[in-house]
Image (tube, grey):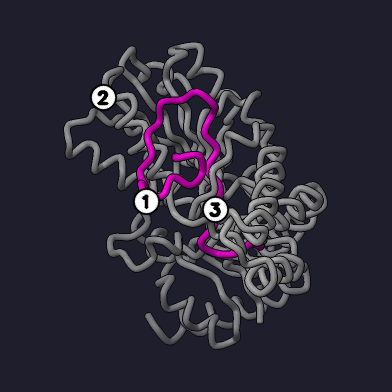
Amino acid sequence: MIYFDNAATTRAADEVAERVRYMLLENFGNPSAQSMMGVRAENELNDARKIMAKSINALPEEIYFTSGGTEDDNWAIFGTAEGYKRSGKHMITTSIEHPAVSEPMERLRQKGWDITVLDVDKNGYIDLDALRDSIREDTVLVSIILVNNEVGTIQDVAAVGKLIKEKNPKTLFHADAVQAFGKYPIDVRKMNIDMLSMSGHKIHGPKGVGFFYMKKGLKVRPIIYGGGQERGQRSATENTPGIVGLAKAVELAMENMNASHEKVMEVKRTLAEGILRDIPKTHINGPSIEEASPYVLNVSFNGLRSEVLLHALEEKEVYVSAGSACSSKKKGGSHVLRSLGLSEERIEGAVRFSFCRYNTVDEAAACLEILKEKTAFLRKYMR
């Protein structure tokens, strides 16, 4: 099997699975309970919180455990809307955001909020001057994805954060770091990030768990109410197995970040250069091979439908995707690729390959040979 769909989800690291098993079968107490079992579980959560905080240069009390990126994004947007509605009703985002950001923004628009959606260039980059001009006195939030999940565009987050605070210090900056966390250094202080989203299953951690960073002192309101867990900000019994597994995944990601970056880039370069060299009518979408995230490669195979090519690759146990896994069943094609100004033919034939530190150059070479075989066959017999 060749698994090149890591932007959708990753397999859990062995060390992560061991920690999850330990919390499920041995240290399974409720961290809110006052018994020794509860205390033991709570201690694990406290240790995990410190690990998360250290990874982004935050304080432990600024870390909240959640179900992952979608909840985080919703919390940042709806929580800010509720907590800062007296300060203004204007938010800014971009045209290439994940649906977990774009859909809540649209919901606010329907409720009377003024939402500015920044356009991007052909490589997916926002115009910093356009961002500066869009920030107003009543702008309460700017939400921008750090690394785009479909084409791998890396925004200049430090420049964005600096610009926002210079134009309006009261405007909050939310960074969707789901595809960036654990792959690039993130310092929320230096980058002027007020809120940050991440998901464990993108970094070889468990599914259904993540953490939300919220700078101390913000008036962002909770969106989940109940028993008052997470210091009253996110009620619900904590997913202790997931959180402890996530902590191990974060540790491993931090330890392997530089080595992983170099290894993954070699895998991507092998596949990308091979496709462009050996398969006619192919185009890389978004930034160049070297400029985009090494973890994401989006290629259009002109004259083919991505869904047909995906299933042909599956016959050889090669797994890739046609875009964001969270919206792959929606009709209308990729809004990200459309925002880049691509033709319908290129959008229709776009395939996303996404990599992780466990992938190898040999897998890339094998994938290339299968792609050559399948694309030649499909173009010959399925016109």
For the residue marked with disc 1, what is the amino acid? Pro
Residue count near mark 1 (Cα–Cα under 10 Å), binned few <14, some 14–19, many ≥20:
some
Q: Pick out the residue farthest to the front.
A: 35
Magenta stretch bounds: 204-232
Expressed as whole percent of the image width and height from the top left, the position of residue 283 reads: 53, 57
Q: Is residue 254 above or below residue 25?
A: above
**Residue 32, disc:** 3
- Mark 1 or mark 3, earlier in chain: 3
Q: From the image, which quarter does the C terminus lie in?
A: bottom left
**Could you tell me residue 295's position as x and y percent?**
64, 55
Q: Label 3 amino acid?
A: Ser
Front residue of 120/67: it is: 67
Q: Mark 2 points at which residue?
A: 89
In the rendered structure, are the residues bearing label 2 and label 3 in contact, judged by CB atoms less than 8 Å apart? no
Report the side of 16 relative to 380 (left or right): right
Checking the image for residue 99, the label placed there is: 1
Q: Residue at x 36, y 29 (%)?
A: 92
Distance of mark 2 from mark 3, alpha carbons? Answer: 37 Å
> Which of pointers 1 and 2 lies earlier in the amino acid sequence?
2
- Labels 1, 2: front one: 2
Q: Residue at 50% of width from left, 39% of height from top?
A: 231
Could you tell me the amino acid type at mark 2?
A: Lys
